[in-house]
Image (cartoon, rainbow, N blue to C red):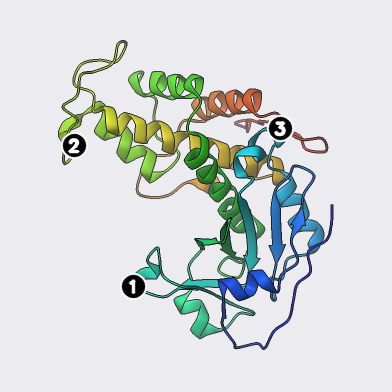
Amino acid sequence: MSTPVQNAPAQHELWAAEKVATHSTIATAPNGLRFSAWGQTRIAHAEMERLVGAVPRALAPALSARCYYFVPLVMAEGENGAEGGTVFAAPDYSADASDRAICHRNTTLGLVEAVFISTRLVEDRFGLSFEFAINVAHNFVDAVGVPESFGELVWSQALAAVRGETSQEAWDARRRAIDPSDAAEATPAATPAGIPAGVDERARKAYQDAAFADAVAIYVLSLAIDFDYHDLREREYPLLAAPALAERLRHIARLFPANDGYEFQILYRRRG
């Protein structure tokens, strides 16, 4: 694996994404993913290589048009960093830039779909690793979609009323799918075979997309670092029951085996 070079431009100068890309050295991980570090990211090269390398090889072909840029802070012009605005990166942390920064931004640079990720908005390895993993997961879903077998698994769990979900997006879409009265606009189309009448089919697909992206991200995260599942908990929705998540992750592991040098394990905490 080649080593990315972190350039050191003037501390308070903002660079447009195109300029960052022009002055960055692109590395290619053994799994085929391309990435680069620019500015004072405060991430050791070995740590970044380990993180990017955690993405299973079987996922990588769908991400061949992507390049992941790790920069201190990323921001975009326009209200709330709206898509389509010019993307900028700050070469180092500053309070002013931090106030304007966002976790990530996607932008097209020629033939490359660039994903800029802020490394200095989070202070721990867990937060940055999950930000990278969830981007990878959503990029894969955008390119390929959801494997039918996984979609069937999560839908069977939803119909069995398994407790909780893996994200607010998945939780909301699942509720709309099961009870279309929760949706602003229920799908009037005929219900496919095997799906109960009254199901909002668009919400069901959105639920499967979100649940799959979440599961892939958690799986990649588990390959990159050791973490406690409850660290993912948020207040707005109940976290998916651990046995149900384990079933999803084992399914993902069968579809996308871990690379050499990485190990997938699920460890249950004993009640003492």
Residue holding disc 1: 79
Mark 1 or mark 3, which has the lower sequence index?
1
In the picture as drawn, the residue positioned furthest to the top comes out as 194
As measured in the structure, the alpha-carbon distance from the residue carrying label 1 to the one carrying label 3 is 41 Å
Would residue 74 be seen by someone viewing this image from the given angle?
Answer: yes
Label 3 and label 2: CA atoms lie apart by 37 Å
Q: Amino acid at mark 1?
A: Glu
Q: Return the mark for residue 264.
A: 3
| Callout 3 secondary element | loop
Q: Which is in the foreground here, disc 1 or disc 3?
A: 1
Q: Which quadrant of the figure has residue 137?
A: top right
Residue at the image point whose x is 23% and y is 23% from the top: 199
As drawn, 160 above or below 97: above
Earlier in the chain: of badge 3 and badge 2, it is 2
Q: Which mark is residue 181?
A: none
Q: Classify mark 3: residues with Cα within 10 Å, few (<14), some (14-19) or many (20+).
A: some
Amino acid type assigned to the residue bearing label 3 in the image: Phe
Residue at the spot of label 2 = 182
Q: Amino acid at mark 2?
A: Asp
The residue at the point 36 percent across, 74 percent down is 78
Where 259 sits versus 153, above or below? Answer: below
Q: Which residue is more in the foreground, 81 or 242?
A: 81
Nearer to us in this view, 102 or 9 = 9
Judge whether residue 214 can be spotted in this image: no
Front position among marks 2 and 1: 1
**Residue farthest to the front?**
110
Q: SS class of the residue under badge 2?
A: helix
Rendered-image quadrant of the C terminus: top right
The residues bearing labels 2 and 1 have C-alpha atoms spaced at a distance of 29 Å
Give coordinates of residue 266: x percent, y percent: 66, 30
**Residue 51, position in %: x, y?**
71, 51
